[in-house]
Image (tube, grey):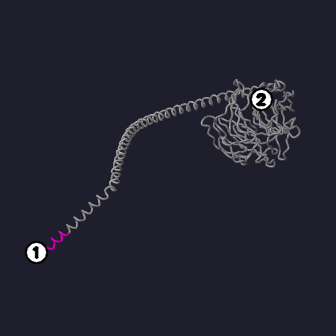
Amino acid sequence: MASRIRTNQDQIIENQGAMNQTLTEIRNAIEQNGDLVRPELNNIILNQENIMGRQEQIEESQEQIKQCQDEMKRKKRKMNKEVDNIKGDIEGIKRKHDEIDVKVKQIKDNVDEIKQTQAEMKADQMDFKAEVRNQFESMAVMLHQLLQGRNINNNGAEGLDPPVVRVNNQDIIILGGYNVPGLPTVSNTVEKFNMVEGKSTLLPKLNYPRANLASCVYNGNVIITGGLDGQVGTDSIEISEINQDPLRWTMFDGKLPLKLSGHDVIVYQGKLYVMGGYNWSENKTTDNIYELSIIPPYTANLLARMPHPRRNHKAEIVNGKLFILGGRATSFCKDTTDSVVVYDFIKNEVKSCTSLLKPVWGMSSVTWGKMIILIGGKDKHDQVVNEVTMYNTESGQSQNLPPLIHKRAASSAVIMDDVIVVLGGWNKEEGYLNSVESFTMEGDQWRELPGMMEKRVGANAVVKPRN
């Protein structure tokens, strides 16, 4: 064992000697190469100083960035607070706006209710005026009959004196129509024709041109519906209180249920009734009978359908029943009809009546007692006629009256007392007409009157309501 320890000690001593020799060699190498290593060492030290300087700059920049971030966070907190305040203001504004909307709706509802009440009051007033007028006219008829009876009793027989034309100083209002021969030009002009003076005066124009329109008079108001503007049909309605000064035409809030031309309208018991016509929305003739409210909310109801569609027909009220006569089903004259139907308002049904003597369309019409008088028009052979036919709504019998002086299709006609006046129209020989002629019931011929200012085809005429 001792020999082993001694051997190890010898080895350790030998190793220490080798290490010392190596260290000596290293020291000698360093001393020999010191001049070469020292510049590199200096460069390393310089680079370390530069790196430390840049590190200080980076630390300063980081500090500035941190300060900026803190400032931005502060401003963001401030902005968030301001946004919250704005949101609160917006919510307040919304609440105010909602409150205003509620109040506006309440005001609108009140206004609508007032309008409804006013419209109902006006309708009642108009019905009252109409009733008074009807009673007055009935009294006048009774007085006329009494005077006739006294004349018969005094003379023992009815007098054979020729009928006397009663002078009627009411004006006739003529509306729209085609007025340029050879061109499909539709007019919006309105003129007033006076029989006594024998002259016409132009009135303010309609808002829109209209031909093949339909019109009626209701309690001092002239109501104009639909028609063709030269391109397409319209569902619009214009109205005017004809005795107002200055006269003006107002667009009515209500509309026809369809865009129509060649239809007819009447007013009965405060409702507007619309019959037939060419439906521009579907490009076909309609067979519908509509009821339209002339007070808000202007609802339209389909009441019934005629057995066949028709346009360019005529409709009249006689003894509380609506009679619809003649017309055509298509644009072809061969589809002209002689049929007559009656609509019963109480039973809400349509029934066929005795037919006319012959098919006719594009005529004008008036009523005289229980009679409906059809004037002119075209037959199923596309021939314009000057025939005047009186249709008895009770018996269904037709009677020819003296013919017109001029053949007329698409003319306009009115009746004042016992005097029929027919205006304008068209025939092949004379073209567009501005001529006017009149006929006294129980007379034997038509009488030529001075013409209108403008030639008119497919116009409408109404008697100006009395003040």
Query: What residue does disc 1 label?
Result: 2
Position of residue 391 measured from the top left corner of the image (x, y, whole percent):
79, 40
Rounded to the nearest angstrom, the CA distance separating label 2 from label 1 is 156 Å
Please give the count of numbered marks on the rendered protein.
Answer: 2
Question: Would you name the residue on which mark 2 appears?
Answer: 191
**Image-based side of 53 in relation to 461, left or right:** left
Q: Which span of residues is magenta-colored?
A: 1-14
Magenta stretch contains residue 429: no
- Is residue 150 rendered to the left or right of residue 91? right
In the rendered image, the vertical position of residue 192 relative to residue 378, given as above or below: above
For label 1, the SS is helix
Q: Residues within 10 Å of mark 1 (few under 14, many from 20)?
A: few
Residue name at image x 35 percent, y 54 percent = 40
For badge 2, the amino acid type reads: Glu
**In the current view of this chain or complex, which residue is farthest to the right?**
429
Give the image location of residue 137, x and y in percent: 72, 28
